[in-house]
Amino acid sequence: MIRQIANQLRKERDAEIIMTGPHLAAMLGMKLARRRGKFLAVHYHHQGVKSPAVWRFLYRVALDRFDWVTFPSDFVRDEACALYPPLAARSLTIRYPNDPPPPITRDERAAARRAWNLGDDAFVIGNGGWLIHRKRFDIFLRVAALVAAAEPKAHFLIAGGGEDEGKLKLLAAELGIADRIVWLGWLENMQPFYHALDALHFNAEWDALPVTPQEAVATGIPLVASVANGGLREIFDSTLAHRILGNHDVEALTSQLIEIARDPQLANQRAQSSREYFLKLSNPEKIAAAHIKLMTKRP
């Protein structure tokens, strides 16, 4: 594979090389072809994914082959620089771009809810992603049980799948909320999911910069979240519209969701303020300009 990559790179002499993820075979192929790349974009957290020694080796090879290494959050960049300090001088944070989706219409909201047998007056909380331990859907369910006890019209949507799905369904049954949850599986189009929501409740143990909360906020949905290790607070805390917890405080998360249920007008006003702030921060033209500047900058 390394030689095949090298042969292809030799044919593309005029191409600028931009790589997503530290793919070792591709980087070794670049070395064999005597090519350098402009930048390597790393979009994943480090802890528990590979050993520190492997990360240090990958980043040493990366700095030999690329001018720059980019990360989507300061959190994950700081992780990388702690593992391999030479990265500090040749890396930077560039956020994800987000195109603003159009506002949700009343008809879209009604259609999305009909699709999953939810009433117009239901208070709908959702989350989506891999059903694996680090995504902490167990926290989502424990909070859901408390919200359901306080709000009779509360219902919950879960989009996604994964190895913990069976375990999570058993937990939902133990908590007495199995009849309040719709398990959607993987969706090719997430827009109807967002259209149905009154709030997104996201939790994670580790996440570099999770996409689901960004898409929800861009759509204008109130967000409640807890991320023990990750960069989510970097893009939302300063708006004062969302309180992203650094720990999985079930009672605090429950309180925030009940507040949204009981004062939806205030929650939506805050969500709109957050949406405006976030879309300025993640403006695609601004992100593209940052990449162009990087492509012309020498390390």
Image (tube, rainbow, N blue to C red):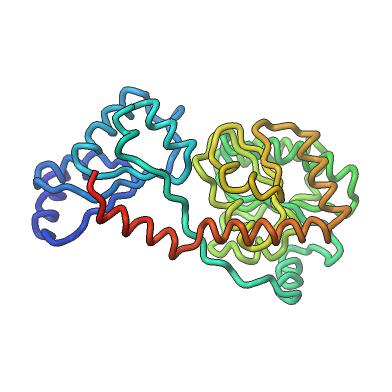
In this rendering, position of residue 11 left or right of residue 230 = left
Residue at the extreme bottom: 107
Quarter of the figure that contains the N terminus: top left
Q: Nearer the viewer, residue 65 or 169?
A: 65
Query: How many marks do you count on the picture?
Result: 0
Residue at x 80% of width, y 34% of height: 251
Asked which quadrant contains residue 221, the reply is bottom right
Asked which quadrant contains residue 263, the reply is bottom right
| Image coords of residue 115 (percent x, y) | 71, 67
Q: Nearer the viewer, residue 31 or 89?
A: 89
In this rendering, position of residue 145 left or right of residue 232 = right
Quarter of the figure that contains the C terminus: top left
Residue at x 73% of width, y 40% of height: 141
Asked which quadrant contains residue 66, the reply is top left
| Image coords of residue 191 (percent x, y) | 61, 65
Q: Nearer the viewer, residue 112 or 286?
A: 286
Q: Is 233 situated above or below 51?
A: below
Residue at x 78% of width, y 43% of height: 144
Residue at x 33% of width, y 29% of height: 55
| Image coords of residue 245 (percent x, y) | 68, 36
Q: Nearer the viewer, residue 100 or 5?
A: 100
| Image coords of residue 204 (percent x, y) | 60, 38
